[in-house]
Amino acid sequence: MTTTTIKNTTLTTLMQTVELIDRHSQQATDAIMGLVGTAQNALKADDAAGTGTAMDAIIGLARDSAAEIKAQATVVGCQDTAYAFCATSNAPTKVRELQTAANLMDLYIQEAAGKIAGVAAVTKAALGAGQLESLRLHLDSTLLTIHDMASTVQGLVNGTAEVVGSNYRDAA
C-alpha cells in the first residue's frame, strides 16, 4: 500500500480513522437504540424514573460520542469553522476522498448527536412534569424519533465509509 503523508497523516492512518469513526458511530448508535428500548419498557411499566434514567444515558452517550468522533476526525484535518471543509488540494485522489469522507461523517454525527440529545432532554423534562399518562403517546413518539435519528445517522456514516472502502464490518 502506498503511504502518502498529508499533515502528518498517512493514507493508512486516514483509512483506519474513517473505519474507526464508522465503528464508533455504529457502537454508539446501537447503544442509543438499545437505550430507547429500555426507555420504552420503562414507559410501559409507568416507570417515569427509569425512562428519565435512560434519557440521561442517551444524552451523555450522544454528547460523549460526538466529542470522541470529533477528536478522531481532527486527526485528518477536519475542522469546525464557518467555512466549508476542503480536502488537501495537492493530495492524491484517495487521500482527498478519505479526508472528505471523515469530514462528512463527523458533520452527520455532530448534527444527529445534538438533535438526539435535545429530544432526549425535552423528553426527560416532559417526564418531570408529572403527567405521564396524558403525555404517554407523545413520549412514545419522541422515543421512536430518537431511535430513527440514531438509525439514520448510522446508515449515513456507514454508507459514507463504504463508498471509500473503509467501512467497519462487525466480526459477529
Image (cartoon, rainbow, N blue to C red):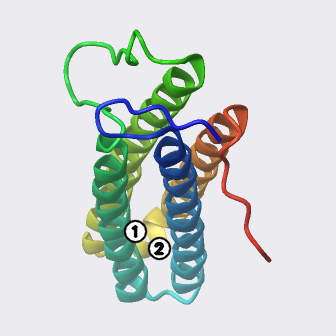
Check the image and name the residue furthest to the front: 2
Whether residue 58 sits left or right of residue 96 in the image: it is: left
Of the two numbered discs 2 and 1 in the rendering, the one whose residue sits closer to the viewer: 1
Spot occupied by residue 125 in the image (x, y as percentages of width and height): 26, 64
Count of all numbered marks drawn on residues in the image: 2
Q: Nearer the viewer, residue 158 or 15?
A: 15
Of the numbered discs 2 and 1, the one sitting upstream in the chain is 1
Q: What residue would you read off at disc 1?
A: 58
Residue at numbered disc 2: 133
Query: Where is residue 161 drawn, in percent x and y?
Result: 63, 40
The numbered disc on residue 120 is none
Please tell me whether residue 62 is drawn above or below residue 80 in the rendered image. Answer: below
With respect to residue 82, does 95 lie above or below? below
Q: Amino acid at mark 2?
A: Glu
Above or below residue 73? Residue 34 is: below
Res 126 → quadrant: bottom left
